[in-house]
């Protein structure tokens, strides 16, 4: 089986799902902490494709390099970020070697290029936040803007005030900002409060059972 490697120095987590793969696949890149290398190995996948009416779907093998290219493109939004300068994008890419070591990545020209691209991207994000702040649109400044400033060491901006208030909390898994009292993180989808989450599931089942009991009996 072929293998390809997605490499990341991106400071936020990324998730992509492919429900048509057999079995269904979920690709997760955790946040890179302080520029550390994060790697995700990608293998060949099977996807069933329609062969026409009345004909069973046909299993088609998708090679790892195509899967990896597609996932990396989605992680970086295919370089389609609005209002970004040329050669500025998140530091996520497919390694030239199938299964490189960290030392090989750090010594590669692709890594150096990715660092430059990401620094340019994050600088543009900080500039965007400054523009929003000047326009009185601070409510449109989000986690990405603050994380970009943190990574670049930018300080002293009025919009960098801490959002960890009574209405917000930080996900213990991916460190994203989420509403206080959330049961699952909306970014990485991990359960952040197992006790409350399980209790909610029990109540949900009980409510469903009660609703079923209230339905009229079907007479044959």
Image (cartoon, rainbow, N blue to C red):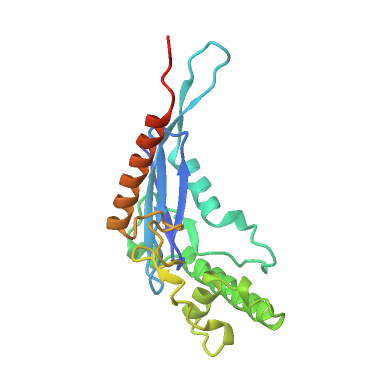
* Residue 19 shown left or right of residue 102 in the figure: right
Would you identify the image quadrant in which residue 32 lies? bottom left
Name the residue: 42% across, 67% down. Answer: 180
Q: Residue furthest bottom?
A: 156
Quadrant where the C terminus is found in the figure: top left
Q: Is residue 180 left or right of residue 76?
A: left
x, y (%) of residue 96?
45, 54
> Along the line of sight, which residue is nearer the eye, 215 or 45?
215
Name the residue at the left extreme. Answer: 195
In this rendering, the count of numbered labels is 0
Nearest to the observer: residue 21 or residue 142: 142
Left or right of 194: which side holds 4?
right
Q: Residue at x 54, y 90 (%)?
A: 156
Nearest the eye: 126 or 192: 192
Give the answer, above or below, for where 181 lies relative to 131: above
Residue appearing at x 53%, y 82% in the figure? 160
Q: Position of residue 181 (x, y in %)?
A: 40, 64
Residue under the image location 56 percent in, 71 percent down? 142
Which quadrant: the N terminus?
top left
Residue 214, x across and y down, in percent: 41, 31
Q: Position of residue 152 (x, y in %)?
A: 50, 80
Q: Which residue reaches farthest right? A: 135
Is residue 115 placed above or below 161 in the rendered structure? above
In the rendered view, tell whether residue 113 sits above or below residue 28: below
């Amino acid at each position: 089986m072929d293998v390809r490697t997605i490499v990341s120095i991106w400071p936020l987590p990324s998730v992509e799902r492919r429900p048509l793969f057999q079995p269904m696949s979920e690709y997760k890149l955790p946040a890179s902490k302080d520029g550390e290398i994060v790697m995700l190995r990608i293998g060949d996948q099977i996807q069933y494709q329609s062969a026409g009416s009345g004909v069973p779907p046909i299993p088609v093998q998708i090679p790892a390099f195509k899967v990896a290219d597609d996932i990396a493109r989605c992680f970086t939004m295919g370089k389609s970020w609005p209002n970004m300068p040329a050669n500025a994008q998140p530091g996520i890419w497919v390694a030239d070697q199938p299964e490189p070591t960290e030392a090989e990545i750090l010594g590669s020209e692709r890594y150096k290029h990715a660092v430059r691209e990401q620094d340019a991207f994050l600088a543009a994000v900080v500039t965007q936040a400054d523009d929003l702040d000047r326009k009185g649109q601070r409510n449109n400044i989000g986690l990405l803007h603050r994380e970009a400033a943190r990574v670049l060491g930018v300080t002293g901006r009025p919009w960098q005030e801490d959002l960890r208030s009574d209405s917000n909390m930080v996900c213990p898994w991916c460190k994203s900002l989420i509403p206080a009292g959330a049961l699952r993180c909306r970014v990485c989808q991990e359960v952040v409060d197992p006790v409350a989450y399980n209790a909610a599931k029990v109540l949900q089942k009980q409510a469903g059972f009660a609703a079923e009991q209230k339905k009229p009996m079907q007479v044959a």
